[in-house]
Amino acid sequence: MQNYDNLIGGKWVAEAEAMPNINPSNTNDILGNYARGDAASVDAAVEAARAALPGWAGATPQLRHDVLEATGATIMARKDELGRLLSREEGKTLAEGIGEVTRAAQLFKFFAGEALRLGGEVLPSVRPGVEVMIEREPVGVVGLITPWNFPIAIPAWKAAPALAYGNCVILKPAELTPGCAWEIANILKESGCPDGVFNLVMGSGRTVGAQMVAHPGIDAISFTGSVATGRQIAVQCAENGKKVQLEMGGKNPMVVLDDADLDVAVGASLNGAFFSTGQRCTASSRLIVTAGIHDAFVEKLSAEVAKLKVGDALDPETQIGPVVDERQLQQNLSYVDLARSEGCEVIGGEAMDGQGFFQRPALFVHATNDMRSSREEIFGPCASVIRVADYDEALAVANDTEFGLSAGICTTSLKHASHFRRHIQAGMVMVNLPTAGVDYHVPFGGRKGSSYGAKEQGTYAREFYTQIKTSYIAP
Ligand SMILES: NC(=O)C1=CN([C@@H]2O[C@H](COP(=O)(O)OP(=O)(O)OC[C@H]3O[C@@H](n4cnc5c(N)ncnc54)[C@H](OP(=O)(O)O)[C@@H]3O)[C@@H](O)[C@H]2O)C=CC1
Ligand SMILES: O=C(O)CCC(=O)C(=O)O
């Protein structure tokens, strides 16, 4: 069994403890033992990152570009192998795994370009003879805390802009999925990333994550994960004066109007609710359907759900891979029971036999928006179907949630699509498309309880990973 160490100051560091990385499709398949760092590992990584910071912050944009470009190129060249690793550790299907790895490569390549494009502004002062310059500088040492559900794309979309804009990085991936993060660290190192600029500290959130949030040598924290952990991190960062960015949950609405193309609506809902086993913060977990199309929609969607092939992520026939672990499976099953007890007709949702954590996708039909199963993020292959009278009620129900990440509408009416786009309280809006599945070069993030702080991805990522300096110059 191979051991995988932490990367601190450019050296691979073995830790006293290690944790097996278990394949959720087949719990007999162990990918390797991954180091479990502790608070002292974080201290060492911070020391290394702070030592490397002046060099990296002052490096030419060409060097930063070249490191990121080479990293992206290597990830792309190894996409099949890394996609397989991703599927083995997280449980996405092989096609989804390779797709996510491709996205990670594209993210590194996009931000390689951004390293060359970071500019400032020169403005005339209101005072005679004075010039004002506005420049962006790195924030410093940034801590990245990432979840298990996108084990390569999320580390990539945080690390690539952080490095492009001259920051040093400490990445703590989720303990369930350290394999892809280890590969990113290894590829960055092989691509010429100087020692200490990128550090990988694997370990638990309670020790490594908490120490990163508390450490005075880390200037900013970018976090993706649960609402409970995110809010706790935000409070601590505010107390310590750290810049913070949070991407958390969603209970994303997909509105289906009477005039929708039924095939488009069913296809978008099936994809948005169930692909990647529903383990996406952008998943369509509330299908809000107007009365005239409701029964036809439920009939067609149920038939499609019944056809979905659930199984081993590496089987090319599989459409829905396993749930990530036993704890998440039990959480999903408890929501299936809850939805039934709340009065829904539950279609599917059973746990399946096998050496992994398999569950049939579940539709909660005849749901209402006040049910707990319609309000709380489940993070599994479960979607509520809520019948509404008309567009106005659909919009009101869609907005009646603490979250505001992504929202979708299926309609052939330009009037309703435009109205929805303007009035939905969400950071991302999809028209005749699934609520999940986003481009890598445009801003990602939500509103209300889903997100906090600056947006991620695209050129907008610079708002978090840079700080502004205004200079007044009199010749
Ligand atoms: N919005 C999203 O993208 C995601 C949402 N979720 C939601 O969260 C639920 C629980 O999943 P879970 O993985 O436990 O989510 P968490 O929020 O606990 O984990 C996200 C990351 O934060 C780390 N972490 C945990 N506790 C702390 C802490 N006190 N200080 C700093 N870092 C910490 C975790 O470490 P580690 O896990 O390694 O110990 C992980 O790296 C899911 O069922 C789902 O509802 C989960 C994943 C992604
Ligand atoms: O929908 C997507 O493509 C991204 C989703 C995501 O980032 C998440 O679930 O954390």
Image (cartoon, rainbow, N blue to C red):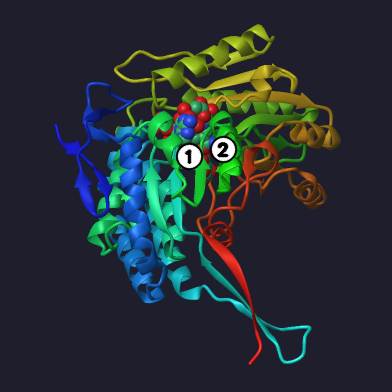
> At 64% from the left edge and 32% from the top edge, which residue is drawn?
251
Which of the image's four quarters has the C terminus? bottom right
Between 273 and 427, which is closer to the camera in this rendering?
427
Please identify the quarter of the rendering in which residue 131 is found: bottom right
Residue on which disc 1 sits: 214
Q: Amino acid at mark 2?
A: Gln
> At 59% from the left edge and 60% from the top edge, which residue is drawn?
463
Q: Amino acid at mark 1?
A: Ala
Residue on which disc 2 sits: 236
Tell me if residue 277 can be seen. Answer: no
Alpha carbon separation for disc pair 1 and 2: 7 Å
Residue 323 drawn at (x, y percent): 42, 25
The outermost residue toward the left is 1
Q: In the image, 451: left or right of 389?
A: left
Tell me if residue 381 can be seen. Answer: yes
Residue 75 drawn at (x, y percent): 31, 55
Asked whether the residues under the numbered discs 1 and 2 touch, taking CB atoms below 8 Å apart as contact, a structural biologist would say yes
Please identify the quarter of the rendering in which residue 17 is found: top left
